[in-house]
Every structure is written in C-alpha cells, then in structure tokens.
Image: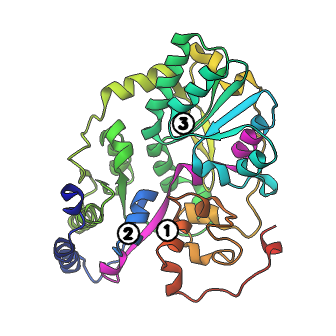
Amino acid sequence: MKYVDEFRAGDLAQGLAAAIAREADPSHTYNVMEFCGGHTHAIFRYGVQDLMPANLRFVHGPGCPVCVLPIGRVDNALELAGDPRVTLCTYGDMMRVPATGRRSLLKAKAEGADVRMIYSTQDALRIAVENPDREVVLFAIGFETTTPPTAVVLKQAAAAGLKNFSVFCNHVLTPAAITHILESPEVREIGTVAIDGFLGPSHVSSVIGSQPYEFFAQEYQRPVVIAGFEPLDVMQATLMIIRQLNDGRHEVENQYARVVTREGNRKAQALVAEVFELRSSFEWRGLGLVPYSALRIRPQFAAFDAELRFGVETKPARDAKSCECPSILRGAKKPTDCKLFGTVCAPESPIGSCMVSSEGACAAYWTYGRFRQQTRPAARSTEAAA
C-alpha cells in the first residue's frame, strides 16, 4: 500500500524530527494535546514521542467515544438489554465497558440477554427487518464521524415504516468538549493541565470541516492543527503548532488537507441537522456536564427514540474506586499514574473505559509497551478495584 507507506517513511520522519528539534525553543515547554485516541495510538505505535525533544510533551485528551461515555449511560443500555422484548445492537468495544458493579453487556449476553455485536448501523436495521416480533435498539455512540450513518438508518426506518426499531442516542460533539477543557473550573480543580496547542481530529473534521475550531483558537488563543492519523501526519502537525507558538500565532491550520476542507461535508451536515438536535447538556466521563455537547433525536423522529419509547432515565453513577480514567481523560494524569494500571486493570480484565476501548490511552500504553519504561507498582488484589 504505497499510499500509506509514504506517511510512515523513516527517512522523512527523521527529517521532521530534526526540524522539530531545530525549531523548538529550548527555553520553552510545548504541551500539545491530541484530542483523538487515533493520534494517541499513532504516537505510541510508531514511537513519535521518542523522536521529540525533551521540552515537547503530548497530553492525551478525551478523544475516544467509548471512553467518554459515562457509566450511567452504560447502565441504561444494560437495563434495555434486560428487557425480554429487546434485542440490543452495539459495537464491539461497548460490549466490555464496565458499568455499575462491573456489569457489562458481554456479561449480560452470557446471562441470556439478546445483545448483538454489529459492524455498522445497517446491521441493526437488518436485524429489525428480520425480527419483526422483537424491539431492536441501536446503542449509538460516537463523535461527529458516526452521526451520519445513524441519521441514515433513522430515515430508512421511517421510510420503511418500521415499528420495532429505535436508537439509544449517545452521539457527542468535539468542539464543545475542547472548549470545556479550556474553561471548565472542574478541570482546573484537579490539577493544572497545561495545554499550548491542539492536534485536531481528522475524521471528525472530514464531516464538520475546520471552521468550527476557529472560535476557540481565537477566543482561547491556542493554535489548532487538524492532523491525520499516520505518524508523519502527527509530526508535521506538531511542527506546525511549534511554528505558530514561536510566532505568537493562534490559528486553525489544516495538515490533513488531502481530506478535510474548511466547510466539511455539507451533505452529511444537512443530513445530521435534519435528524438530530442539540442537547442542552450531556455528561462526559471525566469532564462532567458539558453544555451543548451532544445530540438527541428530533421530535419528527420521536417514534424511533429509544429514550422515549422505553422511558430511559439516566441516574448518577460513579467510576470504580481508584480508577483514574476521569483524570486521564482530562489530560491531568497519565495511565501509569493509575494504581490499577497493569495490575488488576489490563486489556483482558479492564476496570476502566480507557483500557477497554481500542482507542483508549491506557490501551495504547499497554499495547505498545510504554508502561515498561516506568516502574510498575506491585500487584494488587482485585479488591482494590471494587
């Protein structure tokens, strides 16, 4: 795959590393938050941090839709799955996310609940068509990237007059979360999270464009560079942020110009606007309630809203004791700062969402061996995570 190899070329990476080292002012520290888990994994998988100068630090952000979903919403999904009338459809990562009492959809499935792993929203729609005597609920999560496919199945279900299909909507929005990170008192209370610039998510931006980031780049005077998920994308975008900081600029730049435009995908935006509307607030794991950061289904499609059909009520729920996922999602701590990391919390037995999700920061540390660079704490008993 020549097209991909070009973005992983070692000689080009060495050249970018030299340019970053040359242009990074040794009298300054550069803290760059990568909002998206795709960037986090690129940094770890290809050892990008090892090519950076000592005064440049990547801060891992909340950019994983599985990781930021609060436990209360997972509890809701379990309640839906426990309804004998319901077939709950969801993606693979969500199957193992611990809910209250370390329950999960995977365990519910083992106990007899009709929970099905799907690969696309169309799978859920097909299951509804093939099982007219079942209430089929799509447990929909994700950032702006995944909202158009959910909008499509809602319109298809409405056009087909399906009576047994609904969506439990948990779609969240990126710009509102970045703004919240920068201004939230709750975030500042847990520790000083120094952020000098952002690597913007490329897949999200392919839908919404780069324009939505312009407000807070100016308002909060932080540069944003939309970056792809290959190692050279990340390195080039990092160099662009360094140059902005050195010049005293705070603009939105687009490194991922091969896909992203300023306006984004207007057709997808119109489709999403037709089906969804903003929630006044939505809880993010690690960030708390974030105003206007999520979507709900418009009244015109209320017949397909699982929250209305089943009277879903989200109750407060707390994370597992000693789990540091909330602080890790805010960039205030690293995975290795968590006492559970690598002891009772590992990919085969995850306690927190950051270890469950393939895009989570803890999973990245574990998968690519970053935890081995630090002294691991002594093994702890499972009671520590209760």
Q: Which residue is located at x 63 percent, y 36 percent?
A: 89
What amino acid is at disc 1? Ala
**C-alpha separation, residue under disc 3 versus residue under disc 2:** 30 Å
Q: Hey, which quadrant is residue 25 in on the image?
A: bottom left
Asked if the stretch drawn in magenta spans residue 62, the answer is yes
297 displayed left or right of 47: right
Asked if the stretch drawn in magenta spans residue 355, the answer is no
Identify the mark at residue 364; answer none if there is no mark: 1
Which residue was labeled with disc 3? 292
Q: Give the range drawn in magenta.
A: 49-78
Residue 369 placement (x, y as % from top left)? 49, 78
Among numbered discs 3 and 2, the one appearing first in the sequence? 2
Dot 3: element: loop
Q: Which residue is located at x 39 percent, y 43 percent?
A: 204
Which residue was labeled with disc 2? 43
Residue 230 placement (x, y as % from top left)? 30, 61
Q: Nearer the viewer, residue 82 or 288?
A: 82
What amino acid is at disc 3? Tyr
Q: How many marks?
A: 3
**C-alpha separation, residue under disc 2 versus residue under disc 1:** 9 Å
120 displayed left or right of 165: left
Residue 233 placement (x, y as % from top left)? 26, 60
Q: How crowded is mark 3: few (under 14 residues within 10 Å), some or many (20 or more)?
A: some
Q: Nearer the viewer, residue 355 or 226?
A: 355
Q: Quadrant of the C terminus?
A: bottom right
Q: Do the residues labelled 2 and 1 touch (CB within 8 Å)?
A: yes
In the rendered image, the vertical position of residue 87 relative to residue 332, given as above or below: above
Q: Which of 309 and 125 is in front in this view?
A: 125
5 displayed left or right of 359: left
Q: Residues within 10 Å of mark 2 (few under 14, many from 20)?
A: many
